[in-house]
Image (cartoon, rainbow, N blue to C red):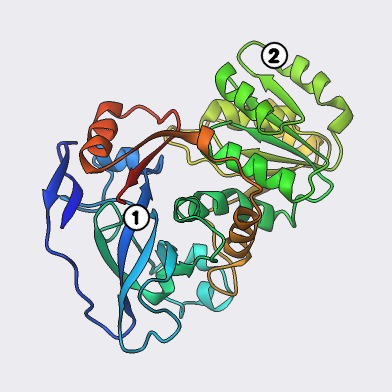
Amino acid sequence: MKSVVIHAEGSVRVEERPVPQIQTADDVQVRVVCSGLCGSDIPRIFNNGAHYYPITLGHEFSGYVEACGADVTDLRPGDAVACVPLLPCFSCPECEKGFYSLCKRYQFVGSRSDGGNAEFIVVKRANLFRLPAEMTITDGAFIEPITVGLHAFHLAGGCTDKNVVIVGAGTIGLLAMQSALALGARSVTAIDINDERLTLAKRLGATQILNSKTSDVAQMAAMLEESRFDQLVLETAGTPQTVALAIAIAGPRAQLALVGTLHHDLHLPAATFGQILRKELTLLGSWMNYSAPWPGEEWETATRLLAQKKFTLSPLIAHTGGFDSFARTVQALKGAPMQGKILLRLD
């Protein structure tokens, strides 16, 4: 079978690999149809961030069941499924409390084992989520990134009737923004430094857009004045500057969910720390996207909203192509962030 293979020197190659076979009774073989590149994959490709090389990445994928192990009785060949990439141990104290994202003995498809950027993959039954008949197979590849924002909402007790502020209008931010709108947020503000992203956010339904490159904190705070109470701020960009900005623009007693992963040290000045105290902010660390019962309400909600056509996904896609096209497009990033989702399409 064909597979997109990442080598230690940062090269992205299309190679022939053996078709993986079912080995245990809870294995499922999947024929992959659509697989997306995640921002977390970029350091794995270009900065020696993978657990091993060569490796086939891909944890945002959907496809059809090809074959099942003897113990898998609730799936059959032809069923449409999406990947649930985390495989917790289910037995540690964290897992027993349903804190699956915090499992310390977990495995992960497309990171600690080969992923879905290939024609076929074999995963455990627990790593698959059945898609409803009314959902397209492409939409299934977006469930995992949608659940990232939904997990933050889960930790915050929901976003209904809250004034939601999204700091960072990249793919995760724009998916979280659309989720908030669908789930009854009172208002949704998108903040970014890229006018094109902000224009798209407005087109996708943002109540308000703010450019943090052309507006200072005082100006943005003034524009958020009417929505400063009952506020939920999601930081999705993952930079020290945007974390500081999120604290600065948060309203009194706001919830601040930290979703973006930092790749540079965060230095917290005394004045910034003072804002956390003086505004009595609630800080929420949000890691991955799972809750009990497995894999969590985030996955049920994402699937329901997608089936109800609550998302506009096509403007978030920068490139769709087969193996060679996908590999060339990923290689061309040279470590830079994506400007939209890159999809491998195998039908």
The location of residue 70, given as percent across then percent down, is 31, 89
The location of residue 260, given as percent across then percent down, is 53, 40
Residue type, numbered disc 1 = Val
Q: How packed is label 2: few (under 14 Cα within 10 Å), some, or many (20 or more)?
A: few
Residue underneath mark 1: 33
The location of residue 32, given as percent across then percent down, is 32, 58
Q: Residue at x 59, y 37 (%)?
A: 174
The location of residue 55, given as percent across then percent down, is 20, 52
Q: Is residue 96 left or right of residue 232?
A: left
Residue reaching furthest to the top: 214
Q: Answer whether residue 194 is visible to the viewer in this image.
A: no
Q: Is residue 99 above or below residue 32?
A: below
Cβ atoms under marks 2 and 1 closer than 8 Å: no
Q: In the rendered structure, which disc, 2 or 1, sits on the residue that comes first in sequence? A: 1
Q: Is residue 187 left or right of residue 11?
A: right
Label 2: state its secondary structure.
loop
Q: How packed is label 1: few (under 14 Cα within 10 Å), some, or many (20 or more)?
A: many
Residue 225: name its quadrant. top right
Label 1: state its secondary structure.
strand
Judging depth in this view, the residue of 182 and 208 nearest the camera is: 182
Residue type, numbered disc 2 = Asp
Residue 270: name its quadrant. top right
Residue underneath mark 2: 216
